[in-house]
Amino acid sequence: MIEFYTEIRLVHVWSVIASGSLFALRGLALFSRAGGTGEGVAMAAPVRFLSYTIDTVLLAAALMLMTIVQQYPFVNHWLTVKVLLVVVYIALGMVAFRFGRTRRVRIGAFAAALAVFFYIVSVALAHDPAGIFSSAFS
């Protein structure tokens, strides 16, 4: 499977871009006040299913890469941080899109989820748990 590393990594990177972009667009649609149609678009079944599909491809590519390079969460610290932050990102997304009781809470969770997303990307780029705060970004 090592011969497909480059292609799998490319699928993983583009899935990250697609997943983050769709999350951001859904959030912007949900919280925009224009026309009141944002919630309908952001929460429409086709958009939700597209999100699930992209995230499934992202996870499958991540698991394949993990196997190829033989780096594993709870063994390699940067991957452990990435996995734990993905759980935080998902929880914040659930508050933003479903469980937040007030608009303010939902917008705060959305903003925090975006910040966590970008930190996850920085951890991945640096291969360091400190992410953007590591010497790799100096």
Image: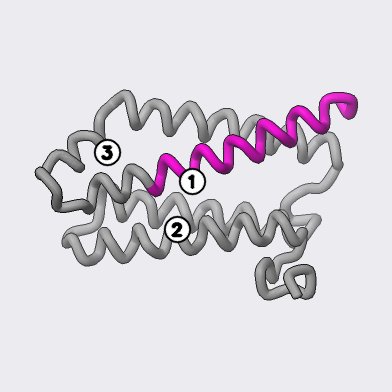
Q: Label 1: state its secondary structure.
A: helix
In the image, is residue 95 above or below residue 57?
Answer: below
User: In what element is the residue under mark 2?
Assistant: helix
Query: What amino acid type is highlighted by mark number 1?
Result: Gly
Residue displayed at 48% across by 58% down: 88
Q: Evaluate if marks 2 and 1 touch, with contact meaning CB atoms under 8 Å apart.
A: no
- Image quadrant containing the N terminus: top right
In this rendered view, identify the residue nearer to me: 40 or 74: 40
Query: Do the residues bearing badges 3 and 1 touch, measured as CB atoms within 8 Å?
Result: no
Q: Secondary structure at mark 3?
A: helix
Residue 88 forms part of the magenta stretch: no
Which circle marks residue 20 in the picture?
Answer: 1
Residue 9 lies left or right of residue 35; in this view the side is: right
| Position in image of residue 69 (x %, y %) | 85, 41
User: Could you tell me which residue is drawn at 25 percent across and 52 percent down?
Assistant: 99
Task: Write down the residue under mark 3.
Answer: 42
Residue on which the image places disc 2: 114
- Rendering coords of residue 27 (x, y %): 31, 49
Whichever of labels 2 and 3 marks the residue nearer the N terminus, that label is 3
Q: Position of residue 39 (x, y in %)?
A: 19, 41
Label 3, label 1: how far apart the Cα atoms are:
14 Å
Task: Tell how many labels.
Answer: 3
Image quarter in which the C terminus is found: bottom right
As measured in the structure, the alpha-carbon distance from the residue carrying label 2 to the one carrying label 1 is 8 Å
Q: Amino acid at mark 3?
A: Ala
Left or right of residue 9: residue 56: left
Tell me which segment is drawn in magenta. 1-24
Q: Amino acid at mark 2?
A: Leu
Residue occupying the far left of the picture = 35
Q: Left of 129 or right of it: where is 85?
A: left
What residue do we see at 82% from left, 31% from top?
Answer: 5
Mark 3 or mark 1: whose residue is earlier in sequence: 1
